[in-house]
Amino acid sequence: MLGNFTYCNPTKLYFGEDALDGLNKELKNYGKRVLLVYGGGSIKRIGLYEEIIKILKNNDKIVFEDAGVMPNPTLDKLYEGIKIARDNNIDMILAIGGGSVIDYSKALSVSIYCKEDPWEKYYARMEDVDNKIVPVGCVLTMVGTGSEMNGGAVITNQKEKLKIGHVFNENVFPKFAILNPKLTYTVPHYQMIAGIFDTFSHIMEQYFSDSDDNTSDYLMEGLMKSLIHSSLIAVKDPLNYEARSNIMWIATWALNTLVAKGKTTDWEVHMIGQQIGAFTNATHGMTLSAVSIAYYRYIMNDGLLKFKRFAINVFNVDPTNKTDKQIASEGIDKLEQYMKEIGVVLNIKELGVTKDMIDDIANSCFSNTGGYKTLSKQDIKQILLNSYHE
C-alpha cells in the first residue's frame, strides 16, 4: 500500500431488525432539545414517525421539527434549518431518512454556530469547521450514500447551479446510526435501484486509481461481487431480507472511509453527476449511472491493467487468448449488462439533459486528479456527448 494514513470512524452502528432499540441507549447521551429532520413525510405513512416520537418523549426530550428536506438539499433549505435550530437552541439533530436528509443534517450541524455564510466557508472555500458542532444521530430508511457513517454533506446552490459536497472530518460524522433493513422496504423501486448503483459507483470511484498491490482493492472487489449478487435478487424480490440487509451493509462500508485508505481515489463520475443534478434535479444515483459507462470507456486505456483486473475478478471475464484491452473492454460491457439488468438510467437524455445544457454542465464541473486521467473541460463535454448519444 502507498503513502501514510490515519483511520478513525467514531460512528456507532446498530444493525438489524431490532436496531431501533439502540435509540433508547443513545438519547441519554445528549441534551433535551432535539431537532427531528426528515423529508416528504413517508416516515409518517409507514408509522416510523410515531414510533420515534414515542421514544423521544419516553426519554424526556423536547422535540422540534425540520421537515421537507428534498432529494437534492438546497442552500435555501439549509438557511431555513439554521433559523429553526438557532431559534430553538437545539442540542441534537436526529435525521430520519436517506442520504439527502443525513447530508443536510450534517451541513446543518456545522452551520448553526457558524459566524460566516456556510456556503462561502464550507462549499466555496472548503474550509474546516472551527465552531461548535451540534451532534447528529440518524435512522436510515434508504441506502446508497453511506452518509450514515461518513462526513460527507452535499448541498445544491440553485442560483449558481452548483451541487457541491464537502467531506468533513470525523468530528462531523453521525454519532450513531440505526440500520434496520426492513425500513428500506417501502422505498420506491426507482429509488432502490438508484441507491444500489450509487453504492456501486462509490466503490468504483475508489477502486479505479493507483497501480500498487493494495489490500483496499481486494476488499472492494468482494464488496462489488456481493452487491451484484444481492442486488439481482432484490430487484426481483424487494422483500428478501437477506439481500436487502447485505445491500445496506455494503452501502455503509462502501463509503465509510475504510477502503479509501492507501488510495488516491477518483470521484470524477460524481463531479459530473452532481452537476447534472444541479441542472436537472435528477436522482443522484441515476446521474452517476447515466455517465459511468461513457466515462469508463473514455479512461479505460489510461488504467488498462486495473480495468483488466476488474473484468476478471468482479465480472469473471475469461482472459484466455485475449489482449489486455479486449479483457478490459469486456469488463465494461459486463458492467453495462448488469446495469441494464437492474434497470438504471444509461443516457443523460433520460434525466432531462438537453444538448444546450452540455457546455454549461461541462464548464461547471470540477476536474479531479486522483484517478487515471485528469479531464479537461473538453474531455468532460465529450463524455457527456457520448452518454447523450448512447
Image (tube, helix red, strand yellow):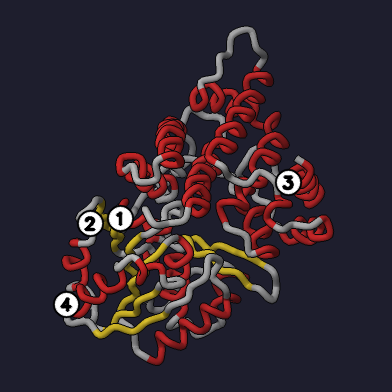
**Which residue, given by chain and number where applicable, does mark 3 sit on?**
375
Please say if 109 is above or below 177.
below
Helix, strand or loop at label 1? It is strand
Question: How much space separates mark 4 and mark 3, taking CA atoms?
Answer: 52 Å
Callouts 3 and 2 close, C-beta under 8 Å = no
Cα distance between the residues tagged 3 and 2: 43 Å
The type of residue carrying mark 2 is: Ala
Q: Are marks 1 and 2 in contact (CB under 8 Å)?
A: yes
How crowded is the residue under tag 2: few (<14 C-alpha within 10 Å), some, or many (20+)?
Answer: some
| 328, 335: nearer the viewer | 335
Residue corresponding to mark 1: 179
Q: Is residue 49 above or below residue 313?
A: below
Cα separation, mark 1 vs mark 2, equals: 6 Å
The image's mark for residue 59 is 4
Q: Which residue corresponds to the image point at 74% horizontal and 57% vertical from the top-left?
A: 353
Can you identify the residue that label 2 sits on? 19
